[in-house]
Amino acid sequence: MNSEWTDPFAEEERQQRRERQRFWRNVSRVGDFYAWLIGVVAVFALLALLFGMYGFVRQSVAAFLSTMFGGLR
């Protein structure tokens, strides 16, 4: 056998495998980007809920205390 001879079909299969790997690697990168984006949006939404809840509790406690101490007089 001649060691310099390569199978053209095997080379074509290797090329197709490399193209598939490249495609799925790019799909993975896009997925990672969207995962980061969704994560950042979720964190900001949770922070907004937290600050909204803080304002609600602060207002409720102030109303409760004013009712309690106003009613004791």
Image (cartoon, rainbow, N blue to C red):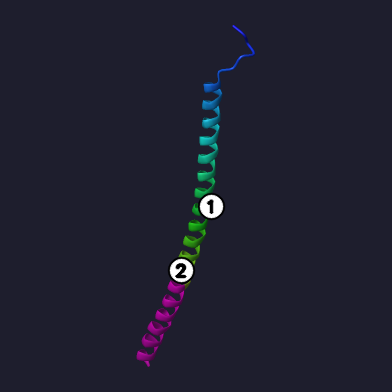
Residue 49 rendering spot, x and y as whole percentages: 44, 69
Residue under the point 36% across and 90% down: 72
Q: Which residue is disc 2 drawn over?
A: 50
Q: In this rendering, is residue 17 above or below 62? A: above
Q: What residue type is labelled 2?
A: Leu
Residue 57 rendering spot, x and y as whole percentages: 42, 75
Disc 2 from disc 1: Cα separation: 26 Å
Looking at marks 2 and 1 on the same chain, the residue that comes earlier in the sequence is marked by 1
Q: Which residue is disc 1 drawn over?
A: 33
- Queried whether the magenta region covers residue 59, the answer comes back as yes
The quarter of the rendered structure image containing the C terminus is bottom left
Residue under the point 59% across and 6% down: 1
Q: Nearer the viewer, mark 2 or mark 1?
A: 1
Q: In this rendering, is residue 45 above or below 38? A: below
Q: In this rendering, is residue 33 above or below 64? A: above
Residue 45 rendering spot, x and y as whole percentages: 46, 66
Numbered label attached to residue 20: none
Look at the numbered discs 2 and 1 and tell me whether their residues touch, using CB distance below 8 Å: no
Secondary structure beneath label 1:
helix
Q: Which amino acid does label 1 sit on?
A: Phe
Single out the residue that lies furthest toward the right. 4
Number of numbered discs: 2
Packing grade of label 2 (10 A; few <14, some 14-19, many >=20) is few
Left or right: 13 with respect to 60? right
Residue under the point 52% across and 59% down: 40
Please tell me which residue lies in front, 29 or 19. 19
Single out the residue that lies furthest toward the bottom. 73
Residue 7 rendering spot, x and y as whole percentages: 55, 18
Residue under the point 56% across and 24% down: 11
Q: What stretch is highlighted in magenta?
A: 52-73
Secondary structure beneath label 2:
helix
